């Protein structure tokens, strides 16, 4: 089969394939690996994953769109995912979101024109004891504050 | 009250996740060696005797769950660890995985060998990227040390373990939705009865799904005995427990206390009371799916049965504390919004009801509601309660119904004043 | 035998049978949307909730197997409340556009609203809206009306056996789509309109043609291939509007293919010859039956050797009449797709067959020889068909004179001396033998169209005319 992903993708798939009785069960791991490499899951990527796992693209698409962590459109280099669930909201997450919207001049779910920042609202991230929390790409920024947010936005912009 | 820190000894410290550290400061796989020596029938009995109840939310007796696996089945048996910790207000499993992953792994190995499983899947929520990496590394260490692989601790028993990441769906914490997700499908809960996972689970094979904290209790039960475990907490609610406290307290965080610990003591003494000198208004005692307790109702002990008696539930022990400067309708909006976003959409009541409830709450909070909306909210909740495939219907209905019932005058005030009284 | 008590009535059941089906045995219809006898069970619409004694929660009748002595209530207050609640939830986002919806009159949502719903609407929010989507040649989708029962998804998976309809997104945002908006590939797409309990998926063929309450329907047999699917034809003012499958577990279960479903349009085609025709020097002229019969009769009388080619959409009864009337003639069967039944085979996993005629087996059993044995040069060739098998091009040239009896299209007339209009399958009663040898009788759905006459009347007239001549 023609290799359409980078080496890392195939290495990861090789490592885990022994643990699954069928290829379909590797769909979530494969999608994670594909998104890691390409940044988001395009229709083309869905087809590539389907081909790799030898399952219909329909099975890939219904799964991709079910899970909120899979991006079906490109996201910024810095993806600010604000938890706005109860615990974070009680600790002022809404203020942080408004601040980010104002500062980046975009609304929730949007990406800045230069493709650097995306801001989105997510549900409980499991960091309620250190609320409010913002997941920046893969990393949790706990006890997040307007000051920390400013630093992050300025640091990346310059 | 008997009290001993067994989990959180070194939470917050750095580099506690390695095998060496675990050997030095914790059970260090000696519980596994002891379990092998005891024989796994005895281990099973010990877990039953300990009265360990599932820490994921439902509080089902763990030993009994293991007993549902059919004897002499020819199919492979699976152990699946539910690390899809997504219940709002809950962050205990994350701490276990981040600070003592080997405790969970050791518990999982003992449990797998007890139910005769040769494969363990750790289904961890996708957002826990760091924790997944820690687990990957810890599992690799366990393989290298011979606690996993073709010959577990020299017994000839083959056991494999892999981390499987979710991808952002609260519903996958429901065990049958989790199994579908693991199979590469949409995370939609399965209908049961007639079939339960113990008989027809992952890949249609017998499967036990256990929560992270539940499995982390196993090494200590094996090590110190059922009797020791039963020494914590009231009858039928045993063991030490990780309580997650968030919201308007001075010192939010993770507190390890025995089952049956008084909620008010936790809030007032351990957490330093309500912040900014304000008063307690309400609290979710067990994640956002639990009916809220009013300040008076918070005089309750934190265990499965006491909270059930108080009309709420311990759930995942995610306690969210709300002060008296907070509009309860705004809390309800956040709650309804969460369930609307996270509903899988299979069942009619949940798919449509969650959205309808959210719209009603938004309208009421904005001062545009009608008095009849209050009864309507209650009725929608009644129509969702017990009418769906999984417990999501109840999880939506219970907290929202409790808020409109217990804070009815505040809801009415929004209607009468045509605005939110908490906004200046 | 084990018994279950449903609303106080004892009903026997077999192991594994679900409450919903067992209740049907005593005409206790439990409302349902997602449940369909022919599809897998998902229990997600929650409309069939019933109360089982001793169980705290209501259970879904579609997914719960009966056990001996089980006591079920389908009408308790708790059930009524829950079911009316589900019905109300379904209407939260339903557009209530019944006046312009084709499903109106045969819509489960309407029906159950009357039976189980509430009088007043308690919702006053904007509803989900989508744009109508074309799903290929057969089906149009109106997502606004969708109640997310997923019957269509399972139908494509399990009946069509192509995973081409999927649920996209989740929760309230769930949308039922084909991937990338592709047209449906299944040869059974029309069935989506049958399984869809609301007006979300309708066939383009029937859409906006007729209000269903004006339609009557009669049972008949599909004449599209050798499978012999049981169907019903809906008609009004002697016009057929649509065909739908009828359940027959031995032949077609609940299904029919699109080819069969839309294969009735020749009946009312503007091309169909609806009155007797005689060939003139440069074209054809219409005649009244009475004017034409003597000359046709004379042609038959004069012929020394006659070949009769019977299209395999003729009934057993018609073959018998032809054989009696033309007792000395040579008889041949004709199917456009196969020579003999031995060449017939299934063309997919379900019910479509290679032989696109309904009665080749019956013709063979009646002793007709295969078409390939027909030799040219006879004095007279008589062709008989019912229109599903078309009049073959060039056939008339194989004899000195040729008469076509049956359903002919104006463009197929070349070479025939006479064209005598007879009936299509829907206009007559008779018997077909399907590929397994199963005999199926059917009755006429509509009266003869135009001046078309039954075969026996035509031959009777010829006989009477014979006597006159003799």
Image (cartoon, coloured by chain):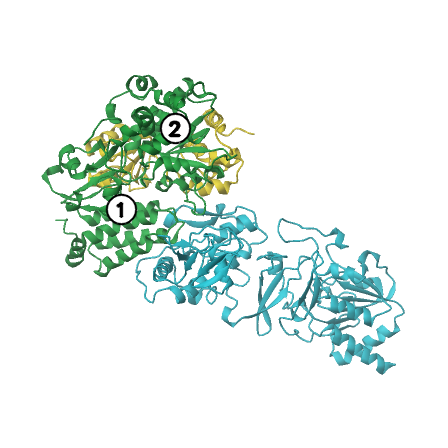
Chain colours: A yellow, B green, C cyan
* Chain letter belonging to callout 1: B
Q: Determine which quarter of the picture holds residue C275.
A: bottom right
* Chain letter belonging to callout 2: B
Examine the rendered structure and indicate whether residue B335 appears above or below residue C256.
above
Which of the two residues, B377 or B226, is positioned nearer the viewer here? Answer: B226
Asked if labels 2 and 1 touch by Cβ distance under 8 angstroms, the answer is: no
Whole-Å distance between the Cαs marked 1 and 2? 44 Å
- Counting the numbered discs, the total is 2
Which element type, helix, strand or loop, lies under badge 1?
A: helix
Q: Determine which quarter of the picture holds residue C142.
A: bottom left
Circle 1 crowding by C-alpha within 10 Å: few under 14, some 14–19, many from 20: many
Q: Can you identify the residue that label 1 sits on?
A: B335
User: Which numbered tag is attached to residue B348?
Assistant: none
Which of the two residues, B174 or B338, is positioned nearer the viewer here? Answer: B174
Examine the rendered structure and indicate whether residue B424 appears above or below residue A37.
below
Which element type, helix, strand or loop, lies under badge 2?
A: helix
Specify whether residue A143 is in view: no
Rendered location of residue C389, percent (x, y): 71, 61
Question: Can you name the residue that lies furthest to the bottom here?
Answer: C468
Q: Can you identify the residue that label 2 sits on?
A: B42
Instruction: Say which label, 1 or 2, has the lower sequence index.
Output: 2
Which of the two residues, A112 or C260, is positioned nearer the viewer here? Answer: C260
Specify whether residue A20 is in view: yes
Rendered location of residue A66, percent (x, y): 41, 42
> Which residue corresponds to the image point at 29% horizontal and 47% vertical from the top-left?
B337
Left or right of C388? Residue A157 is: left
Which of the two residues, C255 or C299, is positioned nearer the viewer here? Answer: C255
Q: Which of marks 1 and 2 is in front?
A: 2
């Amino acid at each position: 089969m023609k290799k359409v992903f980078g080496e890392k993708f195939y290495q990861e798939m090789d490592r885990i394939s022994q643990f699954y009785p069928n290829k379909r069960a590797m769909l979530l791991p494969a999608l994670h690996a594909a998104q890691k490499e390409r940044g988001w899951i395009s229709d083309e990527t869905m087809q590539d994953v389907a081909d790799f796992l030898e399952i219909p693209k329909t099975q890939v698409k219904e799964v991709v769109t079910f899970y909120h962590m899979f991006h079906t459109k490109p996201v910024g280099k810095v993806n600010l995912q604000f938890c706005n669930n109860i615990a974070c909201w009680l600790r002022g997450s809404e203020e942080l979101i408004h601040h980010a919207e104002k500062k980046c001049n975009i609304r929730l779910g949007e990406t800045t024109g230069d493709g650097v920042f995306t801001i989105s609202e997510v549900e409980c991230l499991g960091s309620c004891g250190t609320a409010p929390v913002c997941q920046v790409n893969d990393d949790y920024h706990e006890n997040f504050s307007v000051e920390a947010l400013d630093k992050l936005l300025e640091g990346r912009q310059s | 009250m008997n009290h001993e820190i067994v989990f959180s000894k070194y939470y917050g410290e750095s580099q506690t996740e390695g095998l060496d550290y675990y050997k030095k400061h914790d059970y260090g796989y000696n519980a596994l060696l002891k379990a092998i020596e005891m024989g796994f029938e005895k281990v099973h009995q010990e877990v039953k005797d300990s009265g360990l109840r599932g820490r994921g939310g439902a509080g089902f007796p763990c030993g009994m769950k293991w007993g549902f696996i059919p004897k002499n089945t020819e199919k492979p048996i699976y152990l699946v660890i539910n690390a899809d910790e997504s219940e709002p207000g809950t962050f205990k499993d994350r701490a276990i995985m981040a600070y003592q992953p080997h405790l969970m792994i050791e518990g999982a190995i003992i449990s797998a060998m007890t139910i005769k499983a040769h494969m363990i899947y750790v289904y961890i929520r996708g957002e826990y990227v760091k924790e997944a990496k820690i687990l990957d590394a810890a599992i690799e260490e366990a393989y290298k040390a011979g606690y996993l692989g073709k010959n577990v601790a020299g017994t000839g028993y083959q056991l494999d373990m892999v981390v499987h990441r979710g991808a952002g769906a609260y519903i996958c914490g429901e065990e049958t939705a989790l199994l579908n997700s693991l199979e590469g499908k949409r995370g939609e809960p399965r209908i049961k009865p007639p079939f339960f996972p113990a008989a027809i689970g992952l890949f249609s094979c017998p499967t036990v799904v256990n929560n992270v904290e539940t499995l982390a209790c196993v090494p200590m039960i094996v090590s110190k005995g059922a009797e020791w475990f039963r020494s914590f907490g009231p009858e039928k609610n045993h063991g030490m427990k990780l309580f997650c406290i968030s919201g308007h307290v001075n010192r939010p965080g993770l507190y390890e206390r025995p089952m049956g610990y008084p909620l008010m003591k936790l809030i007032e003494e351990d957490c330093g009371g309500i912040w900014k000198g304000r008063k307690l208004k309400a609290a979710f005692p067990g994640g956002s799916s639990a009916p809220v307790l009013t300040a008076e109702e918070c005089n309750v002990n934190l265990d499965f049965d006491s909270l059930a008696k108080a009309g709420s539930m311990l759930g995942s022990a995610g306690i969210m504390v709300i002060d008296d400067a907070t509009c309860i309708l705004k809390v309800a909006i956040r709650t309804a919004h969460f369930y609307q976003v996270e509903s899988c959409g299979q069942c009619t009541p949940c798919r449509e009801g969650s959205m309808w409830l959210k719209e009603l709450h938004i309208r009421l909070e904005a001062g545009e509601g009608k008095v009849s909306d209050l009864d309507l909210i209650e009725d929608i909740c009644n129509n969702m309660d017990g009418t769906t495939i999984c417990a999501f219907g109840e999880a939506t209905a219970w907290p929202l119904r409790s808020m409109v019932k217990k804070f009815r005058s505040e809801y009415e005030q929004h209607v009468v004043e045509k605005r939110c009284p908490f906004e200046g | 035998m084990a018994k279950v008590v449903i609303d106080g009535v004892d009903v026997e059941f077999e192991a594994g049978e679900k409450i919903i089906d067992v209740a049907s045995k005593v005409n206790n219809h439990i409302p349902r949307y997602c449940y369909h006898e022919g599809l897998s069970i998902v229990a997600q619409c929650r409309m069939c909730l019933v109360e089982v004694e001793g169980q705290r929660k209501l259970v879904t009748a579609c997914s719960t197997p009966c056990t001996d002595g089980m006591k079920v209530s389908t009408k308790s207050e708790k059930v009524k409340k829950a079911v009316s609640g589900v019905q109300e939830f379904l209407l939260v986002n339903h557009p209530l556009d019944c006046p312009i919806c084709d499903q109106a009159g045969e819509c489960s949502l309407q029906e159950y609203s009357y039976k189980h719903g509430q009088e007043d609407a308690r919702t006053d929010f904007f509803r989900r809206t989508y744009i109508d989507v074309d799903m290929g040649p057969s089906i149009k989708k109106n997502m606004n009306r969708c109640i997310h029962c997923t019957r269509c998804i399972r139908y494509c998976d399990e009946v069509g056996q192509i995973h081409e309809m999927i649920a996209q997104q989740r929760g309230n945002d769930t949308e039922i789509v084909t991937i990338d908006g592709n047209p449906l590939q299944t040869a059974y797409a029309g069935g989506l309109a049958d399984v869809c309990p609301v007006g979300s998926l309708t066939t383009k063929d029937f859409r906006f043609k007729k209000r269903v309450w004006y339609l009557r329907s009669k049972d008949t047999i599909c004449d599209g291939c050798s499978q012999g699917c049981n169907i019903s034809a809906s008609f009004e003012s002697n016009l057929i509007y649509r065909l739908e499958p009828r359940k027959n577990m031995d032949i077609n279960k609940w299904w029919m293919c699109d080819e069969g479903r839309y294969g009735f349009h020749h009946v009312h085609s503007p091309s169909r010859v609806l009155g007797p025709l005689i060939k003139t020097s440069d074209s054809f002229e219409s005649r009244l039956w009475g004017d034409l019969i003597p000359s046709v009769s004379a042609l038959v009388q004069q012929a020394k050797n006659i070949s009769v080619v019977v299209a395999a959409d003729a009934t057993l009864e018609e073959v018998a009449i032809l054989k009696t009337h033309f007792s000395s003639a040579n008889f041949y069967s004709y199917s456009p797709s196969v020579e003999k039944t031995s060449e017939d085979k299934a063309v997919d996993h379900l019910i479509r067959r290679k032989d696109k005629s309904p009665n080749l087996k019956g013709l063979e059993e009646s002793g007709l020889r295969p078409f390939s044995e027909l030799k040219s040069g006879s004095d007279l060739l008589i062709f008989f068909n019912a229109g599903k098998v078309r009049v073959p091009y060039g056939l008339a040239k194989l004899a000195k004179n040729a008469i076509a009896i049956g359903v002919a299209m104006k463009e197929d007339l070349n070479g025939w001396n006479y064209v005598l209009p007879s009936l299509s399958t829907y206009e007559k009663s008779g018997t077909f033998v399907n590929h397994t040898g199963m005999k199926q009788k059917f009755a006429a759905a509509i009266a003869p169209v135009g001046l078309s006459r039954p075969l026996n009347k035509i031959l009777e007239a010829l006989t009477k005319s014979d006597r006159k001549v003799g």
